[in-house]
Image (tube, helix red, strand yellow):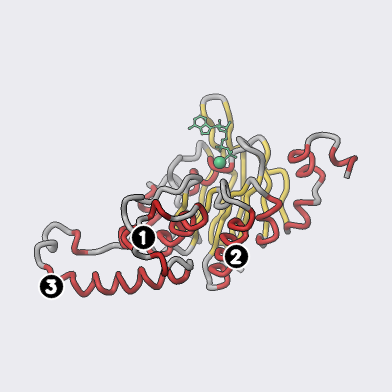
């Protein structure tokens, strides 16, 4: 399996603090790769360095063979790497369908083409069909006409995934997709994500709640204080004394 994403010795400093310190990870194609670690350990900062929100202080980020280090977010988005945020950011006043349509390109928005309706009408119809197909994939098709603010927490997260799919993403980074949702909804989100992985997408999932999310992961990286402390299969990482210590506190390894 080839690497879709790789960070090579990425460091990000904020003043004197290295929020991410010399981290190298790879995300293989068609996997659900998970990044875990306690609050403040640098997970979001690493994702931000990968998706152009932050520029690494040191190191490189590769998407396939392309060095995307320091590229602006929109350019990384255009080459198929999309991220969602810890707090979903849909346009809450718009319907579910309009949110997905908004994530697609439509040449009717070009100023010279906009007045010539027949030039873009067909494209708009195609986009509508594509948007409904995307909503079907994330099980939101029945809700297409609802204002987004009426969706539940799990559905809002899936709407963010739908926007990524509509934008043509091949790699989607999800920052705490099950944060703030109840365990049943969390399982629903993660099983939808797993189904999309089986359809050929690749996910890098940042999660704090490892008990619920780990069983879905193919490979896990664990961080603490900006550094990578463990990696492997869920069984290997969750059984690693260093990880147990970070999550349950010193002494827990002896207690286990
Ligand atoms: N923009 C920023 N400026 C300064 N410090 C930051 C900034 N973003 C994050 N940090 C700090 O970097 C560390 C890692 O944060 P973060 O990546 O958000 O952790 P996580 O996502 O694992 O909870 C924390 O100590 C946080 O306070
Ligand atoms: Mg975070």
* The label number, if any, that marks residue 146 in the structure image: 1
Residue displayed at 17% across by 59% down: 110
Q: Is mark 1 within 8 Å of ligand 2?
A: no
Where disc 1 sits, the SS reads: loop
Q: Is residue 2 visible?
A: no
Where disc 3 sits, the SS reads: helix
Mark 2 vs mark 3: in front: 2
Of the numbered discs 1 and 2, the one sitting upstream in the chain is 1
Q: Which residue is mark 3?
A: 118
Q: Is residue 52 placed above or below 57 in the rendered structure?
A: below
| Tally of marks | 3
Task: Give how far across and how far down residue 234 sits, in percent.
Answer: 73, 57
* The label number, if any, that marks residue 191 in the structure image: 2
Q: Is residue 3 left or right of residue 105?
A: right
Contact (CB < 8 A) between labels 1 and 3? no
Q: Nearer the viewer, residue 150 or 97?
A: 150
Of the numbered discs 2 and 3, the one sitting upstream in the chain is 3
């Amino acid at each position: 399996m080839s690497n879709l994403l790789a960070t090579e010795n990425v460091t990000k400093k904020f003043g004197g603090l290295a929020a991410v310190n010399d981290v190298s990870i790879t995300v293989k194609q068609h996997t659900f790769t998970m990044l875990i670690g306690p609050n403040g350990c640098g997970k979001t900062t690493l994702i931000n360095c990968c998706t152009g929100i932050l520029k690494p202080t040191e190191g490189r980020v590769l998407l396939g063979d392309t060095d995307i280090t320091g590229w602006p977010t929109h350019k990384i988005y255009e080459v198929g790497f999309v991220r969602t945020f810890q707090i979903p950011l849909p346009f809450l006043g718009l319907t579910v369908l309009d949110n997905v349509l908004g994530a697609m390109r439509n040449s009717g928005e070009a100023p010279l083409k906009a007045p010539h309706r027949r030039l873009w009408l067909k494209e708009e119809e195609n986009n509508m069909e594509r948007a409904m197909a995307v909503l079907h994939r994330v099980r939101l098709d029945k809700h297409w006409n609802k204002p987004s603010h009426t969706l539940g927490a799990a559905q809002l997260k899936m709407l963010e995934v739908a926007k990524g799919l509509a934008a043509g993403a091949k790699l989607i980074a999800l920052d705490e997709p099950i944060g703030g949702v109840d365990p049943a909804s969390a399982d629903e989100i993660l099983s939808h994500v797993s189904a999309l992985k089986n359809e050929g997408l690749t996910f890098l999932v940042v999660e704090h709640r490892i008990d619920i999310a780990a069983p879905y992961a193919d490979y896990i990286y664990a961080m603490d204080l900006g550094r990578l402390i463990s990696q492997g299969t869920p069984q290997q990482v969750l059984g690693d004394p260093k990880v147990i210590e970070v999550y349950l506190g010193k002494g827990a390894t002896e207690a286990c």
